[in-house]
Amino acid sequence: MGTDIRRLIAAERRELADLLSGLPPRAWDAPSLCAGWRVREVVAHLTLPYRHSGPRVLAGLVAARGNFDRLADRLARRDTASLTAEELTACLRDNAEHPWRPPGGGFEGALSHDVIHGMDITVALGIDRRVPGERLRVLLDGALSPRARRYFGVDLDGIELRADDVDWSFGSGVPLTGAAQDLVLVLSGRRLPEGRLRGEPSARFTRRAV
């Protein structure tokens, strides 16, 4: 299983690097689904493990008073100030087979990290990229773990998530329907563009157009 997951991770990184290399320059400064981050900050965050050593990250975490989200934001903004879009893309491509794993998350967590942040970019830019089924299944299984749900803290009380493109559902209550990969984003605390979700609860998880 470990070998299979690493194959999926490498494929995801290479495909995302190909997509990024074709983006027009203005797209790199467009907002992503990650609140407060442009596309370039998301890519900087994706490639953070390849450019910052464990001890350096630990020292930064101490300086951030143990708040990893604060540290990640500082590093993403610092790195985008010094690295070009081409350098960030090359870093992702060159590290397609890097063995990084998030603490406690294993290779499944690494795949989820890459796929979710890739969707933070593609969904925000309106790019119709479908996550391959075998990768999506890993995310659907992992998104329901107690650890993942605690981390993202999404309130789904009284809501049933119901995929309309694969045989998958979660919870009970008022249906919230959409593509399985969009429901992964819901579970990850993202607000999606209008029109991607259906059902009475959809407004809670939708980002209104400006």
Image: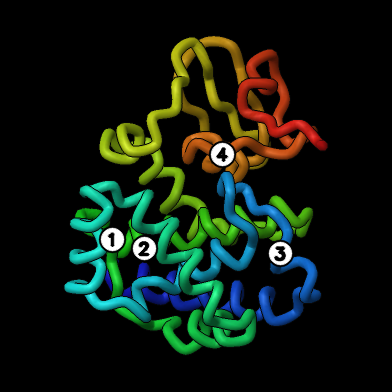
94 relative to 103 in the view: left or right: right
Instruction: Measure the C-alpha gap from mark 1 to mark 3.
Output: 27 Å
Residue 12's mark? none
Q: Amino acid at mark 1?
A: Pro
146 relative to 135 in the view: left or right: left
Q: Amino acid at mark 2?
A: Ala
Q: Which residue is mark 2?
A: 110
Task: Give x and y (percent) for residue 81.
Answer: 55, 74
State whether residue 171 is above or below residue 23.
above
Instruction: Measure the C-alpha gap from mark 1 to mark 2.
Output: 6 Å
Task: Give x and y (percent) for residue 59.
Answer: 19, 66
Mark 2, Cα crowd under 10 Å, few <14 / some 14-19 / many 20+, is some
| Residue located 79% across and 69% down the image | 26
Q: Secondary structure at mark 4?
A: loop
Q: Amino acid at mark 4?
A: Arg
Nearest to N terminus: mark 1 or mark 3: 3
Q: Amino acid at mark 3?
A: Asp
Instruction: Measure the C-alpha gap from mark 4 to mark 1.
Output: 20 Å
Q: Which residue is mark 4?
A: 190
Q: Which residue is mark 1?
A: 102
Q: Nearer the viewer, residue 91 or 5?
A: 91
Q: Secondary structure at mark 2?
A: helix
Mark 4, Cα crowd under 10 Å, few <14 / some 14-19 / many 20+, is many
